[in-house]
Amino acid sequence: MEYLVRIIEILVWPGVALIALFVLRRPIADLIPMLQRLKYKNLELEFQRDLDKLREETRDARLKTTLPPSDESVVVDLDYYLQQVRESSPRNAVIEAWLGLESSAVSTATHFKLMPKRARVSASSALKALVTAGVLSDNDMRIINELRFLRNKAVHELSAIISEYEAAKFLEIARDVTDIIAGEAWQKYGGCSG
């Protein structure tokens, strides 16, 4: 009898764990892509979001966009600045790139008078106005929302580790989205406001 009790004691926790895994398999599977790092005792696994896939999607959309004329020296200076920030602090580079994307959305929406009169000007209201005006597609907004998720991770998760590689990919994607915003608005409205 003691032998049977001992076997049951040994099998109870693994059995509970297996049942929990079976019941929670879908929610756990949905969380895995969002994990940055998983550490258990001596086992440490890192999960990188599929930034390369997102990068390719953005690059394809960017190549279909005609950019408005711009001062190339400003672009080079901004790229240099973001590269320096990325090398010293990948987290801050993500934040700076996001702020640039938001600034582009706000300035484009206000320049082309896409915001409702007396509307509070914010990045989210500017992005909504750009979608409503047909400047941004649903796919563009999906990419922006994925970037927002990563930016939120950089800002709010103090333990989040953002590699230089991830920051570089984020910067490239944010730059392409910024170009898409400006280029699509330029194409749709012919470079003149209102």
Image (cartoon, helix red, strand yellow):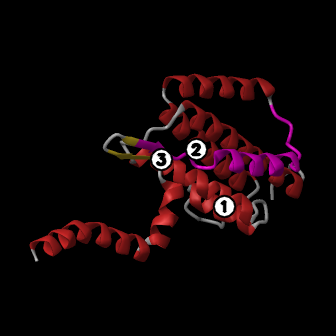
The numbered dot on residue 17 is none
Disc 1, SS: helix
Q: Is residue 127 left or right of residue 157?
A: right
Residue 121 appears in the picture as rendered: no
**In the picture, which quadrant includes the N terminus?**
bottom left
Where, by quadrant of the figure, is residue 176 drawn? Answer: top right
Q: Earlier in the sequence, mark 1 or mark 3?
A: 3
**Residue wearing tag 3:** 36
Boundaries of the magenta span: 44-70
Residue type marked 3? Gln
**Residue wearing tag 1:** 142
- Rounded to the nearest angstrom, the CA distance separating label 2 from label 1 is 15 Å
Q: Is 11 in front, or is 79?
A: 11
Q: Is residue 31 left or right of residue 70?
A: left
Residue 65: x %, y % from top left: 86, 49
Magenta span has 43? no
The numbered dot on residue 98 is 2
Judged by depth in the image, the label closer to the viewer, 1 or 3, is 3
